[in-house]
Amino acid sequence: MADAPKNQVLDVLIIGAGLAGLRALHTFRGAGLNCQILEKSDEVGGVWNYNRYPGARCDVESYDYSYSFSAELEQEWRWTERYAQQPEILSYIRFVAEKFDLRKHIKFDHALAEARYDEARCHWELRSTRGETWVAKTVVMATGQLSKPKKPDLTGESDFTGEIYHSALWPREQVNFKDKRVGIIGTGSSGVQMTPVIAEQARHLYVFQRTANYSIPACHADISDQEDADIKARYRERREQAKNSPSGLGFVPSGKSALDDTPEEREKIFEAAWRRLGYGFALAYKDILLNREANDLAKAFVHRKIAEKVNDPEIAKKLTPKGFPFGAMRPAVDHLYYESFNRDNVELVDIKADPIEELVATGVKTSRNEYPVDILIYATGFDAFTGSLFTPDIRGRNGISLQEKWCDGPVNYLGLSTSEFPNFFIIAGPGSPSLLSNVLLSSEEHVDFICELLVSMKGRQMKEIEALPQFEKDWVAHVNERSKETLYPLASSYYVGAEVAGKPRVFMPYSGGVRGYRRILERVKANDWEGFRFG
Ligand code: N01
């Protein structure tokens, strides 16, 4: 990249203006680093800018899925619902961008195309998809774990005469479902969230389900002024509780095993968790995600709930997940999902039993039937964890690409740094708690850690920082070991790379919990950045 403006060397180029990238910009800038963000969209927000589908909302409570770095911001922003909807989260992110004057350091409409490490100069040369170039001492990837949408590969797509949308590339204009026949392919969190909302608007809705997943009622609620005041008065305490909980969600698992309670006591605990905890239902007992027998008890409870909610026993049976432990695939958190199948205008199509063969001009053709649709929605998820990291061509020492280095799965240290790629960091990358945690909390912790590391490098007048190969090897082994203590590997999910054919089957996130992970980061720091080499 000979045309790079070599006279303007940034300290840090951050990729992505989502929640993680904006936090990185604010923090790095505050530490005196000269930085900029490259953002592929014309707006801040990352996934919350793209996932505008009907019913989209966060399944982490609003007060926990928000920045913790500014007490003033915490007090100023007023959340209206326990689980914020996408427009409210996007408004919050825009508010943060204005309040901290972040936009002036964001280059919008530029996706990273290429990044090359220049070993002689110890810096990165980067080019956007629009051909503009940058030089930066350090690159920080804030590109998210679920940001590369995955489409089903259906023949006949060009013959289909209706409209097609992907949940994660939703248009800004309102999609009108009135009097329309709609098909949703996919029953993960996105499909589950949009189903009840679209069911109310459409003439007819087909939900094409390949794998039934678990869903827990969200128990949405508005936030009263009193509740807002109470939470704000004790916000620090709430943050501490979240930081010290295994998931960063603030739910502390009961100290008990599900096997230790009598059936009556267990029923009471499950019922209370089902009615209040949303995603935290999995933490009603300490061993639901660790022990098969305990998990079976939780499963039986949820299966019973599904049967109670769905009038037709045959449909209830199809909606009941089979073949993997409860929570091993990330459960959805819903509002009236199962109840939607009691409506006359909603039909569940089991595409495991009757697979989709192709799209035809008027709709979806399965091996046994044809379903006429005017609007087809792909709620088919993402190439998770590595999809967004492999989209640009990133090359470290000796021209090795990240994709080549990670051909058998992510190899990194602490989920944020990989050898042969000096001065290159990933926020909440594979190998860190990321998607097994409140990802905003985990991202903020990574930003602070990376910032301290960069300031330390500058203070030592060093030009390079790089993970040591032995430490990353040990870290990958540790991530694998920890995963074996859990039931997560027992489902074919994106946690294990099963969502994309041909992807290496390795366990992606760190399952040791955010508190345990933070202790490791603190130890690394206390031991003078153990596992990193300054050069
Ligand atoms: O994606 P998913 P998602 N033909 O991968 C099916 C977060 N999130 O967008 O399992 C037919 O979970 C696939 O079936 P199968 C959250 O972390 C959070 O829903 O591969 N079907 C599955 O049913 C979540 O876990 C929130 O058999 C195909 C579905 O599509 C993550 O994002 C909201 C198919 C994909 O489910 C991803 O959720 C939304 C094909 N070719 C998302 N390919 C909240 O905060 C895939 N499927 C609440």
Image (spheres, grey):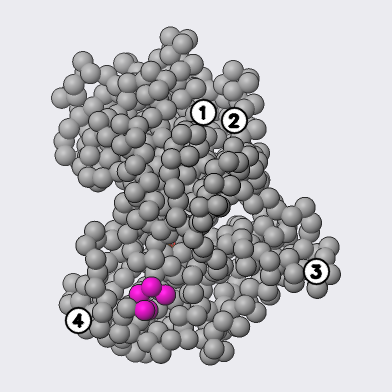
Ligand 1 sits in which quadrant? bottom left
The overriding secondary structure of the stretch rendered in magenta is helix
Q: What residue would you read off at disc 1?
A: 449
Q: CA distance from mark 3 to mark 2?
A: 39 Å
Image-based side of 152 in relation to 159, left or right:
right
Q: What residue would you read off at disc 4?
A: 361
Q: Position of residue 16 (x, y in %)?
A: 33, 40
On the question of residue 471 being in view, the answer is yes
> Do the residues bearing badges 1 and 2 touch, measured as CB atoms within 8 Å?
yes
Q: Secondary structure at mark 4?
A: loop
Residue 198 drawn in magenta: yes
User: In this picture, which residue range is highlighted in magenta?
Assistant: 196-200
First along the sequence among labels 1 and 4: 4
Q: Nearer the viewer, mark 3 or mark 2?
A: 3
Q: Residue 477 appears in which quarter of the rendering?
A: top right
First along the sequence among labels 3 and 2: 3
Q: CA distance from mark 1 to mark 2?
A: 8 Å
Q: What residue would you read off at disc 3?
A: 265
Q: What residue would you read off at disc 2?
A: 521
